[in-house]
Image: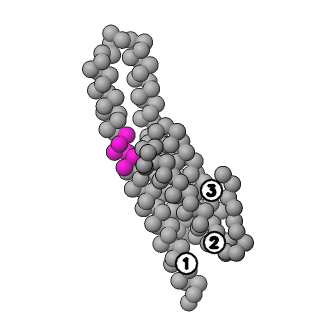
Amino acid sequence: MAYRLRRKGSLASELARVVTKEFEEARKEIGGRNNGRTEAVHEARKHVKKIRAVLHLLEKALADNFRTHDRRLKAVGHQLSSLRDVDAEAETMKAVRDHYPRLVTPSVFAGVCGGLAKQKRRTVARVDGSLRARARDQRGARVSRIRARRR
């Protein structure tokens, strides 16, 4: 989806609006009905990459805050990558089971997949919390900039 900046607002407020929308979309992908599905993780990663792209456009304007925000978003991206890794591990386990059914018994397979599912649930909750926190950071920064401009 392409960014649309409206003429009625300032560039900063329009970019903040776009970033807010991207955060909302990323959280929708991770939480709710999608709950960490492979496609949802991929889409959430794309939303975080778009947010970081906007952040890079504002690097000079954000000055020291840029590094903090970028580092935090990079950490969210790494968390999303670990979700992708869990999916890959489950697929690998299925392939090994199919190729070596005597070695990977149903109980071994169930144990490994159960552990991966538990790990994925914890990571989804952590990513959702991180996205929520980053969205709050962004909204807080936006409010403080508006207050500073009014003075």
Q: Which residue is mark 3?
A: 53
Q: Are marks 2 and 1 in contact (CB under 8 Å)?
A: yes
Q: Residue at point 41% right, 53% down? A: 128
The local crowd at label 1, few if under 14, some if 14 to 19, many if 20 or more residues have their Cα within 10 Å, is few
Q: What kind of residue is marked 1?
A: Arg
Q: Is residue 38 magenta?
A: no
- Mark 2–mark 3 Cα distance, whole angstroms, equals 14 Å
What distance separates the C-alpha of mark 2 from that of mark 1? 9 Å
Upstream in the sequence, badge 2 or badge 3? 2
Q: Residues within 10 Å of mark 2 (few under 14, many from 20)?
A: some
Q: Please name the predominant secondary structure of the magenta segment in the image.
A: helix
Q: Is residue 123 magenta?
A: yes
Q: Is residue 72 visible?
A: yes
Q: Which mark is residue 122?
A: none
Give the magenta part as a residue range: 120-125
Disc 1: which residue: 145
Quadrant hosting residue 110 = top left
Q: Quadrant of residue 151?
A: bottom right
Callout 3 amino acid = Ala
Please provide percent x and percent y for residue 60.
63, 68
Q: Earlier in the sequence, mark 3 or mark 1?
A: 3
Residue lying furthest bottom? 151
Which x, y percent locates residue 47? Answer: 56, 51
Label drawn at residue 12: 2
Mark 3 secondary-structure assignment: helix
